[in-house]
Image (spheres, helix red, strand yellow):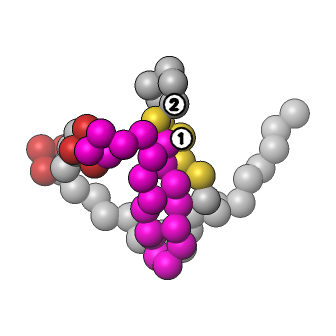
Amino acid sequence: MMVEKPDSFSHVSRQREPAAEMRVLESADIFRGATEIMIRHDGVVYRMKITRQGKLILNK
């Protein structure tokens, strides 16, 4: 059974950067020893957390 999903990201402008110019940030630089940070995007605050298994989780 196929399920069609609406393009829920159609409102987001997509900036195409060449791969050579793509910024890569180290999580250690972002978290600075913490296991959880808050990120404000477009007026909404999100929580990013490092799990015990070392994975990242982003929640609204």
Give the label on residue 51, or none. 2
Q: Secondary structure at mark 1?
A: strand
Residue 39 belongs to magenta span:
yes
Q: Are marks 2 and 1 in contact (CB under 8 Å)?
A: yes
Mark 1: which amino acid? Ile
Q: Residues within 10 Å of mark 2 (few under 14, many from 20)?
A: few
Image quadrant for the C terminus?
A: bottom right
Mark 2: which amino acid? Thr
Residue 11 in the image: state x and y as whole percent.
54, 73
- Above or below: residue 55 compared with residue 32: above
Residue 48 belongs to magenta span:
yes
Residue plotted at (30% across, 39% down): 33
What is the magenta segment's predominant secondary structure?
Answer: strand
Please report the bounds of the magenta region as a residue range: 31-49
Q: Secondary structure at mark 2?
A: loop
Q: Relative to the observer, which residue lies in front, 22 or 44?
A: 44
* Relative side of 12 to 4, left or right: left
* Relative side of 2 to 41, left or right: right
Mark found first going from the N terminus, 2 or 1: 2
